[in-house]
C-alpha cells in the first residue's frame, strides 16, 4: 500500500555484489561445499578481531546459541535469565533446550537489561544469564561479570552475550565476548555483517569450545573434513546430544571481505543515526539514550510514541508513504506463546512491554542516501508529529 507518486525507501538493502561472486565461485570449484577452509579462515578473523581464543561459525545465531546451551548441559529444571525486551530468539533457544527462560525487565532509558534487573531474577536454579547488546549498544558486562561471580553461591553462572546485532560494539574499552564466557553473533540478512543466514560464537574456555564443536554437529566427535583427512576414513563417535548448526563454506565465503572492512563501514551507519537523532531531538518521539564512552554498532533505529494506542497509526502513516518500517521488538512476554508459557512475565516486566507496544523502526543501512533519509525525516515530521499532538 503506498501513496501514488511517493518515493519508495526500503527498510534494508545489503551492499554485497560482484566482488563476493568470485569468492562464492571459488567454493563451488572445491569438492565439499560445507564447513571447511573458508569457515576456518573466518574463525581466525573473529579470534583476532575480538582477541578471544576460540571462535565457531554457525548457520544462525539461534542454532549456535542452542548448541552452546546443549554443550553446557543446560536443560530441564534449569533457568536462564534473559531480557524481556529482545528478539524472541533469545528466549526461544532456552525453551528449545528444555530449560526455562526467566525474563528480567530493562532500563527505561537505554532499554538494556542491567545487572540489577537480572539480580532480582536469580534463584538456585539459575545456570546462565544472557545479556543482549540491544540496537547496537553493549550491556554492562563488567557489572554482569560481578553479578555472575557472586550470585551463584559457588555454582557457576554462565554469561552468554547475545551480540547478534552488535559486532562493532565497544563499552568502556571492551568488546563483545571479552567479559562474558561467550558471545554469539548473527549474520542474518539484515545484520551489519551478513551472509543471508549465519552466526558465530566466540568463547574463552577450551573444554567449552570442544563441547560446542560437538554440539554444533549432532554431537559427533569429528567434522566431515576431518573424517576424510589424509584421504582415509576416520571413525567418529557421538559424544553428546547436538543439533545441526554448522555453516557451509558456500555462505561463509561472503564474510571475510565484510569483516576486513567492518570498521570502515561503521561511520556511515553512525552518520545516518546521528542525523536522525538531530532531526528528532526536539520532537515528540522517544529514542533510546546513547551511553557515553561506548561505540554503538548502530544496527537499527527504533523510535517510540508516548501512547501505545498511537503506535500503529504512526507506523502505518510512514508505511503508506512508501517507507519500510518494522517493530523491534514486541516484548517477548507479550507474545501469545509466552503469555501461556510464562504467564507471570507480562506484569513483571512493564518497561519492556510498554516499549514493545510503542516502538517502530526506521530504515538504517549504509547505502541509504541523503535524499532517501530526508524523505524519511520529512515524512515523520509531517505525517507522524501531528498525530502525536
Ligand atoms: C537477529 C537476532 C537474533 C537471531 O539471529 P538469527 O541468526 O536469525 O538466529 C537473536 N537475537 C537478537 C538480539 C537478534 O537481533
Image: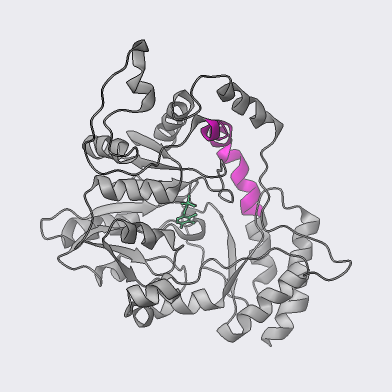
Q: Is residue 348 magenta?
A: no
Q: How is the image coloured?
A: one colour
**Considering the image in quadrants, where does the N terminus appear?**
bottom right
Residue at left 67%, top 58%?
11
Q: Quadrant of residue 350?
A: bottom left
Res. 321 in view: yes
Q: How many marks?
A: 0
| In the image: residue 173, left or right of residue 271 | left
Residue that lies at the very extreme toward the bottom in this rendered image: 389
Return the residue nearer the eye: 243 or 325. Answer: 243
Q: Is residue 253 magenta?
A: yes
| In the image: residue 124, left or right of residue 54 | left
Residue at left 37%, top 62%?
91
Q: Quadrant of residue 304?
A: bottom right
**Considering the image in quadrants, where does the C terminus appear?**
bottom right
Residue that lies at the very extreme toward the right in this rendered image: 5
Instruction: Pinpoint residue 207: horizontal percent, then vertical percent.
Output: 21, 36
Residue that lies at the very extreme toward the top in this rendered image: 231
| In the image: residue 369, left or right of residue 207 | right
Residue that lies at the very extreme toward the left in this rendered image: 154
Return the residue nearer the eye: 258 or 138. Answer: 258
Instruction: Pinpoint residue 174: horizontal percent, then vertical percent.
Output: 39, 47
Q: Quadrant of residue 311?
A: bottom right
Return the residue nearer the eye: 22 or 53. Answer: 22
| In the image: residue 123, left or right of residue 363 | left
Instruction: Pinpoint residue 270: horizontal percent, then vertical percent.
Output: 61, 53
Find the magenta span and give its range: 250-271
Residue at left 83%, top 62%?
7
Residue at left 72%, top 71%?
318
Amino acid at each position: 500500500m503506498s501513496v501514488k507518486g511517493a518515493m519508495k525507501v526500503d527498510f534494508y538493502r545489503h551492499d554485497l555484489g560482484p566482488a563476493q561472486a568470485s569468492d562464492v565461485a571459488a567454493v563451488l570449484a572445491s569438492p565439499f561445499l560445507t564447513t571447511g577452509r573458508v569457515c576456518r579462515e573466518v574463525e581466525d578473523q573473529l579470534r583476532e578481531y575480538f582477541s578471544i581464543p576460540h571462535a565457531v561459525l554457525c548457520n544462525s545465531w539461534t542454532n549456535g546459541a542452542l548448541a552452546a546451551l546443549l554443550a553446557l548441559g543446560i536443560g530441564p529444571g534449569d533457568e536462564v535469565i534473559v531480557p524481556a525486551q529482545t528478539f524472541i530468539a533469545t528466549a526461544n533457544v532456552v525453551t528449545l533446550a528444555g530449560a526455562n527462560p526467566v525474563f528480567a525487565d530493562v532500563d527505561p532509558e537505554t532499554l538494556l537489561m542491567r545487572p540489577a534487573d537480572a539480580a532480582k531474577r536469580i534463584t538456585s536454579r539459575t545456570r546462565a544469564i544472557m545479556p543482549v547488546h540491544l540496537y547496537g549498544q553493549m550491556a554492562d558486562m563488567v557489572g554482569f561479570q560481578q553479578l555472575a561471580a557472586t550470585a551463584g553461591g559457588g555454582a557457576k553462572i554462565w554469561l552468554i552475550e547475545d551480540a547478534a546485532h552488535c559486532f562493532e560494539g565497544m563499552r568502556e574499552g571492551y568488546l563483545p565476548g571479552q567479559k562474558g564466557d561467550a558471545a554469539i553473533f548473527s549474520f542474518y540478512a539484515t545484520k551489519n555483517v551478513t551472509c543471508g543466514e549465519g552466526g558465530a560464537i566466540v568463547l574463552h574456555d577450551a573444554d567449552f569450545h570442544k563441547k560446542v564443536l560437538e554440539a554444533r554437529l549432532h554431537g559427533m566427535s569429528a567434522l566431515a573434513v576431518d573424517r576424510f583427512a589424509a584421504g582415509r576414513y576416520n571413525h567418529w563417535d557421538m559424544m553428546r546430544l547436538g543439533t545441526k548448526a554448522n555453516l557451509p563454506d558456500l555462505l561463509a565465503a561472503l564474510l571475510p571481505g565484510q569483516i576486513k572492512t567492518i570498521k570502515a563501514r561503521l561511520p556511515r551507519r553512525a552518520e545516518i543515526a546521528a542525523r536522525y537523532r538531530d532531526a528528532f531531538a526536539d520532537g515528540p518521539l522517544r529514542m533510546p539514550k546513547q551511553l557515553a564512552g561506548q561505540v554503538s554498532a548502530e544496527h537499527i533505529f527504533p523510535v517510540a510514541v508516548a501512547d501505545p494506542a498511537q503506535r500503529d497509526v504512526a507506523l502505518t502513516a510512514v508505511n503508506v508513504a512508501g517507507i519500510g518500517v518494522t517493530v523491534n521488538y514486541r516484548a517477548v512476554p507479550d507474545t501469545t506463546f509466552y503469555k501461556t508459557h510464562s504467564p507471570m512475565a507480562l506484569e513483571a516486566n512493564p518497561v519492556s512491554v510498554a516499549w514493545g507496544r510503542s516502538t517502530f523502526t526506521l530504515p538504517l543501512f549504509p547505502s541509504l542516501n541523503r535524499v532517501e533519509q530526508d524523505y524519511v525525516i520529512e515524512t515523520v515530521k509531517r505525517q507522524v508529529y501531528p498525530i502525536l499532538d
